[in-house]
Amino acid sequence: MKAAESILLGWLVLAAGYPVGATHPVREDLDAVGKNLEQEKVLLQRLRKKSSSLLQTLSEIEKRLETAQAELQAAEIELEECEKRRQDMFDKRRQALAGLAAGKKRISVRLRAMYKAGEIGWLNFLFEVGSFKAVLDRFGYLQWMVRRDKLLVEQNARSHLRLTQLEHSLEEQHVRLRARKEQVLKSREQAESAKAEQLKAIELVRREAGLHRKAVAELHKARGRLMQLVSMLEGKDSVNLGFASWRKRLEPPVKKARIDVPFGLQVDERFKTKTLQQGVDILAKEGSPVVSVYPGKVVYTKPFQGYGLLVIVDHGGGYYTLYAHLGTFLVKEGDRLRAGQPVGTLGRSGSLKGPYLYFEVREKGKAVDPEQWVRFD
């Protein structure tokens, strides 16, 4: 059973002939409730620290997200500027190529004209003027025109080479910037994923803390209910049918029963907490008859918070058995029972884990291992 359930059942007992001046078993059970309260409080403190740690980590993740966003914006600006420079370079390169092509075309036209004219044609062009000075002027013009065309072609070639080199450089820069942007996007995606996981963890811790706060409150209430139950049972007559002589020979309360949670100290591996299981959890088919393991008198048949429908049987000599989470009652208070007589049916009332029977044996007010009395399958 759950920790709170086990402690809530540290109820019973009213043991005939209990030594005067000794610690009453109910007080021991109440002490156990107190210990479990302390455990719950310690666990709550751990959960608060864990929540604080998770919030701190979340803050760090959000800083990473802010940094990634700033880096992404910077990368996008640089990439946009690089795109503009590339476009400007492409325009200048087209202009340089157009100028180079135009210069080559002009030279090509003149070369074709010179080829068609031949040597005589060029001589005629030079000497068809009247004076020697005019010939020299024409010859000088031809030399200037050739040098000018050569210079234009060389300038356009150099400009084209520079622009080609700039294109390669900008292309490399563009590749680097795109890679940087992809890396920043990946970092941001990882940070967003980590943030989502952290938020889930925080929600889970807060939910668990809420459950444990509720458990603490229930344990406080359990003390009051425990004392009320004891007061109700006190003073009732007790039968004496020799229960003690049947150790390890009693038939189980349910046929084909299987113990799911045994008697004794139980350790929660997740939270590293320890609780005392005062009885056993028995799994069987829902609706199966639940019988008294020994003759006795029914002293309690009511719903009990945390245990659903509850039957307590007094077997005399300070021995009691308890049957919890029943589906139905088949007896009433004051009934005298024989061994094997049904007290109810196996159910799930007040259960957090489906149908099962919680069975407990009390010897002189203290919980004892039911397997020391009952022969389970």
Image (cartoon, rainbow, N blue to C red):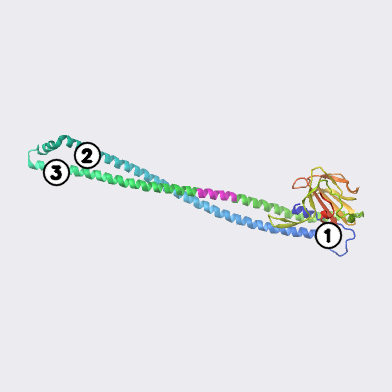
Residue at the farthest bottom position:
21
Q: Which residue is mark 1?
A: 25
Q: Which residue is mark 2?
A: 107
* Secondary structure type for disc 1: helix
- Residue 137: x, y in percent? 12, 42
* Secondary structure type for disc 3: helix
Mark 2 or mark 3, which has the lower sequence index?
A: 2
Magenta residue span: 186-197
**Whether residue 80 is visible:** yes
Secondary structure mainly formed by the magenta segment: helix
Q: Are marks 1 and 3 in contact (CB under 8 Å)?
A: no
Q: Residue at x 78, y 60 (%)?
A: 31
Kind of residue at disc 2: Ile
Determine whether 287 is above or below 262 in the image.
Answer: above
Q: Which residue is mark 3?
A: 140
- Residue 234: x, y in percent? 88, 56
Q: Residues within 10 Å of mark 3 (few under 14, many from 20)?
A: few
Measure the alpha-carbon separation of dots 2 and 1. Answer: 120 Å
Q: Residue at x 42, y 49 (%)?
A: 176
* Secondary structure type for disc 2: helix
Q: Are marks 2 and 3 in contact (CB under 8 Å)?
A: no
Q: Nearer the viewer, mark 2 or mark 3?
A: 2
Measure the alpha-carbon separation of dots 2 and 3. Answer: 17 Å
Total marks drawn? 3
